[in-house]
Image (spheres, coloured by chain):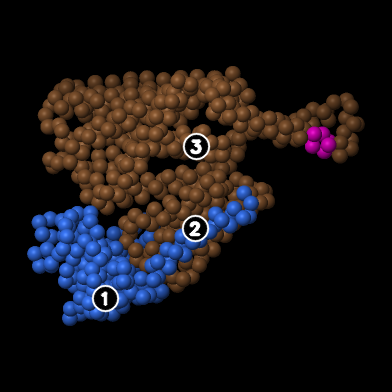
Chain colours: A brown, B blue
Amino acid sequence: MLSEGDRIQKKISKLKNRRNIDVFKNISTIEALKFKMVGEMMKEEEFYSRLRDEIAEWQKDGVIESSQAEAIIRRYGIDKKGYKPGNVITALSTLAAILVGVGVILFFASNWEMIPDIVKVILLLIATFGTYYAGYILRFEKKTYPMAGHALLFLGSIFVGATIFLIAQIFNINANFHWLFLLWFIVIAPIGYMFDSKPTVGLYLLIFTFWMGIFISGSSYQSMSHPLLLYLLFGIALYGIGQIHELTDKWSRFKMVYKGFGIFFILISYFYFSIWPSYFFYSSYYGDVKFMASEQLLMGSFAILAVASVLANLIEKDRLKSTRYEFYVLLSAFIGWIFLFVINTYPIFQQNTPVETFLFIISNLLLIGLSIGTISIGYYKNQPEFVNTGILFFALGVMQVYINHLQGMFPKGLGLIIGGIFLFFIASYLEKKRRHLLATMKDHGNE
Amino acid sequence: MNRKTFIIAMLIPMIAILAFIGYNYYTYSVGEEILLKTVPVDPRDLFRGDYVNLRYEITTIDLTHIPYTGNITTGDNIYAVLSKGEKFWSITKIGNYKPGLQSNEVCMKGKIISSYSNQLMVEWGIESYFVPEGKGRDIEREIRNLSVKVAVDSNCRAIIKELYIKDEPVKFGN
C-alpha cells in the first residue's frame, strides 16, 4: 500500500510524463501542485477525523448502534487511514523507552558506589524531568517529532519509578515495601492523562496490579484464591472503567487498555478457579479465607464499580448488540465471583465427591461461557485481540478439563494417546475458527 | 497542552519525590540512634540491586516474657517500647497503640507477619540493607558479628543508619 507521500510523487510523475510537460518546467508550479494536493489531503484527513468524532457522538446519543458505527468505520476505512506507520513508530519508540528505562533502573540498582548518594539523586531528577521536558517540546510545543516525544514522556514515567526506588535504596527501605509501588502509581496516573499517553496508562495499571500483589502477599492467606478473588473483581471493575472511558470524547482512546487488562484478569482468575474452585481442593486447612480491613476496602470499592458497571450495561444492552455481550460477560463474571467468594469465605460445603463434581462443572462452565462471550465481544466490536484472548482461554479450559479429569478415565498409555488426538483436533478446530473469524472481520473491513 | 499545564503536571512528581526524600530524611537525621543485634541472609531484588536481608533479635517476640496490652493478631500493626541494655536495645513491652515513653526509651512500629502459640514474628521496616553488587556474601560471612545502628523518630518510625561488623562501620567506598 502506498503512503501519502508516494501517492503525491506518483501523481507528479504522471503529470510530468504527459505531453504538456512544459507546464511543469517551472519548479514552483510543481510545488504549487504539491501544496494543493497536500491541502486536499489535509481536508480529507479533517473529514475523516470529523467523521470519527461524529460517529462517537452518534453512538453516544443512540442514533446508531455500535455495529453500525463499525460498518461506517469499515466503509470509509477510517481505522486504517494513515495510522499504521505511526503505530509502528510508536511501538518502536515505546520499546526503546522501555529498554532505556529498564537499563537506567538496573544501572542504578547495581549500587554504583563510586557516586555519592546525593549526586545519584540529582542525576536521576535531571534525567526524569529533562526527559519529560524534551518529550513535551517534541510532542506538544514544536511538534517536530511527536512520536519520539510520546516515547520520551513514557520514559519519564519509568524514570519516576527509578528515582523512587533509588531513594528507597539510599534510606534502606524494605525491599518488599508495597508503598513504593503505590507512590509510583499515584504520581504517574494523572500524568498519563495530562500527556494523553496510552503507554503510561498501561504502565500505571501494571504498577497498580503489582502493588496489589505485594500488598496482599504481605498479609496472611491460605491460598491463591485469596488474591484471585480480588483480581477477578478488579478485572470487572477495570472493564467497567474502560467502558466509562469509551463514553467520553477526551479519553476514549484509553478504553482498550482498561478493557484489555480487565478481560485478562477475569479470564485468568476463572481459569484458576476452574482447577481449584474452593480452598479444600488444595488445602487440608478447614477454615475460611480471611481478608484484612484494607483488602476489604479494596474489594468493596471494586465491588461497587463492578455493580455500577453491570447496571450501566443492563441499561444499554438493548440498544447496542456489542454492549449486550459485554453485559452478559460482566454479569456472569460478577455472579460467578459472588458464588466463589461465598464458597471460599464461608465453609458452607463439606468436601465430598458430589460437591467437588458440582463445583467443577459450575466453574468450568463459567470459564467456557466467558471465553465465548469474549470472542463475541471481539467479533461485534471488531477487536481481534478479544477474539484471540477468548480462544486462548477456551483452549486452556478444554486442556485443563482433559488433563485433570478425563485422562484418568482411560488406561495410562491409552489416555495419553486419546488425549493427544483429542487435543490436536480441538486445537486445529479452534485455530480454524479463529482464522475464519479474523478473516470475516477483515472482509467486513475491506467492504 | 500548553506550558502552564506541563508545569502543573511536573509539579506532581516533583512534590511527591521531594516529600518522599524529606519524610525519610527527617527520621534519618532527627531520630534517636539505637543499636540492634541482627542475623542476615542475602537475596536479590531486581529493582534495587543487592541487599542483605536482616533479621533482628527483636523480630521474634515471646509473649510469655514480654508484657503486652490489647488484642494482638497476625496482620496487625504493633508498637514496641525499647530500652537500652548493656550494648543493644531490646523490647520491654508491646501494644496496639503508640505508647508513652520514659527518657531512656524509644518506640518502634511494626507489623505482625505471623504468630504461633506465644511467638510473634514482626516486620519493623528495617529488614533490607543495600550493598554494592556481590558484597552481600562478604557481610553474610560475618553473620555472628553483625549489628545495625537504627534511627527512630518520635512517630516510632525506624530507618537503618549504619551496619557494623565487629563494631566497625561497614564502608563500600561511598
Q: Distance between the residues labelled 3 and 1?
A: 52 Å
Given this view, does label 3 or label 1 mark the residue nearer the observer?
3
Q: Is residue A396 left or right of residue A205?
A: left
Q: Residue at x 61, y 35 (%)?
A: A83
- Vertical comparison of A4 with A98: above or below: above
Pointer 2: what residue? B13
Pointer 3: what residue? A245
Read off the magenta span: A30-36
Q: Residue at x 41, y 55 (%)?
A: A183
Would you call the spot at circle 2 few (<14 residues within 10 Å), some (14-19), or many (20 or more)?
many
Badges 2 and 3, same chain: no
Q: Does the magenta stretch include residue A340?
A: no
Pointer 1: what residue? B34
The quadrant in which residue A422 appears is: top left
Given this view, does label 2 or label 3 mark the residue nearer the observer?
3
Residue A395 appears in the figure: no
The quadrant in which residue A184 appears is: bottom left
Secondary structure found at label 2: helix
Amino acid type of the residue tagged 2 in the rendering = Pro
Furthest residue in direction front, as rendered: B100
Q: Which residue is drawn at 55% across and 54% down?
A: B9
Residue A219, percent from left and from top: 25, 51
Query: Which quarter shows the N terminus of chain A?
Result: top right
| Chain under numbered label 1 | B
Pick the residue in front: B82 or A436.
B82
Pick the residue in front: B79 or A262.
B79
| Chain under numbered label 3 | A
Residue A156, percent from left and from top: 52, 54
Q: Residue at x 31, y 36 (%)?
A: A269
Would you call the spot at circle 1 few (<14 residues within 10 Å), some (14-19), or many (20 or more)?
many
